[in-house]
Image (cartoon, helix red, strand yellow):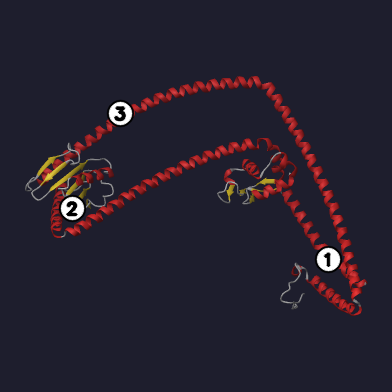
Amino acid sequence: MYKSVTINIPCDENLPEGFLTIRPEKVLLAINVGYKCILDAEQSMLELTEEMIFNKVKEETAGEIKKLETNLLVEKEIAIKMDERTTNKYEIQIERYKKQIDTLTSQLRTYESENKDAINEAVKKEKEKCELLLDAKEKRIDKMQETNDQIKEALIKLTHKSTSHKGSEGEKEFKVYADETFMDFKGYELIDKHAQGGSGDFHMRFEEFDLLVDAKNYKKGVPITQREKIRDDLLKNEHLTFAWLVSLNTSIDKFDKAPVMYDWINTKQCIVYINNLSQNEDPRKLLRIVWYTCKELYKLVEKGSTEDIELTNLKDKQISFMTKVKNIRKTMREINTTINSTKNLLQVVDDQLKEILEEETEQIVASNYSVFDSWWDLNVELTNEDVRLVSTDLWTKFKHDNKSLLNELDITTDKFKQYIKTRVSMSNIILKNKNAHSAFEIKGIKWNANVEKLETEKLDILLVDTEVKPERKKVNKIKSIKEE
């Protein structure tokens, strides 16, 4: 059992380093010894003169100096023995590596001398085969290119023919609908304009107003290109207020939320999008509804143009502004598409650079594989556990174990990192930042069990030494004071 005691010390002073970590028994011993030392010192100070105090301090200091010199000599002897032992160890390893290198060199020379002619002959044959294959592939590529050009020309002709055919079919079908719907309307006349560029397929003339019409008979949705085309056509025909883009059997892209949708391109002109006209229950009734709606809108346009010209100008500016915004958004989408394509190309280039670096790495470390492999197998262990080691720790250990080889084989930190990348998968390497020369972590490896045990023993010995030495000095000092 222990009890707590409050001790006051000056506010500008601190307890000795490590005092709070020692056991309670040692704390009590330190207090008792210190207290007795203070009493003895005070009593001695009363009895001693200044000269005696000086001599006493000098004698104590000389004793401490002798002890320190003795400790330094002992440590120096230990260090010399450790250096000799380490030197002998490395000399043995170097001799073993030299023998391995000599053996491998002799084997390589023997192999080269025995197989030189066979290798040259095999290389020559392979070279001839590759040349023949290359010539054959070039011929095949030329033929394929010619065939591809022919196919493109045929597709262009077929596409043009198919588009023209679809357009003529759509025009004929809409003409039937229009004639049956508007034949009793005043001033009705359907004028064919498909042969005139920028005028649409038809102009429908009425007593009240005229219309521009484009009829489409697509199997898929009407694309944006057709919307842009009818917009340009209507802008060219400034005397017309309305343009109808009629899709007979499909929907119109971006304007397919309702059977009929309206898009004002300025304050005087509007595009009417009609979706799936032939699929409607009564196509003729739908066309009449659209026409009457356009008639009422036409009256509003005519009235607005005569009453408030300034408001019309403001609306035109607003519509022009919105048009520019739409164009900017379209450009931004194209830029984003280009950026994404560029990113994909950069990824491909990055992968190719990684392959090149791996090849260069294999060439760089080929001459030093034996040194690195033996050290790696002795110190590092592969595992499926969720553990990691930092390349800096591996380099520190390698440098400590192979000091004599670093300068001889010109092994640097960067080369050592390349060695590591040859022993583990690139997916197991985690970079700490984007700098190519920075340290990184390696997943799935740990120190060999023998290495961990050796490091633990060294740490225990170091802790014991640091704990025992200060106590021995204190006891010697206490004894010397008591004797005096």
Earlier residue among tags 2 and 3: 3
Above or below, 139 relative to 402? above
Look at mark 1 in the image and give the residue it sits on.
471
Q: Residues within 10 Å of mark 2 (few under 14, many from 20)?
A: many
- For the image, the number of numbered tags is 3
Secondary structure state at the residue bearing disc 2? loop
Secondary structure state at the residue bearing disc 3? helix
Per the model, the C-alpha gap separating discs 2 and 3 is 44 Å
Look at mark 2 in the image and give the residue it sits on.
268
Earlier residue among tags 1 and 2: 2
Q: Farthest residue toward the front?
A: 51
Per the model, the C-alpha gap separating discs 3 and 1 is 100 Å
Spot occupied by residue 142 in the image (x, y as percentages of width and height): 41, 24
Spot occupied by residue 98 in the image (x, y as percentages of width and height): 76, 35
Seen at 78% across and 69% down, the residue is 23
Front: mark 1 or 2: 2
Front: mark 3 or 1: 1
Earlier residue among tags 3 and 1: 3
Seen at 69% across and 49% down, the residue is 396
Per the model, the C-alpha gap separating discs 1 and 2 is 103 Å
* Quadrant holding the N terminus: bottom right
What number is the disc on residue 154? 3
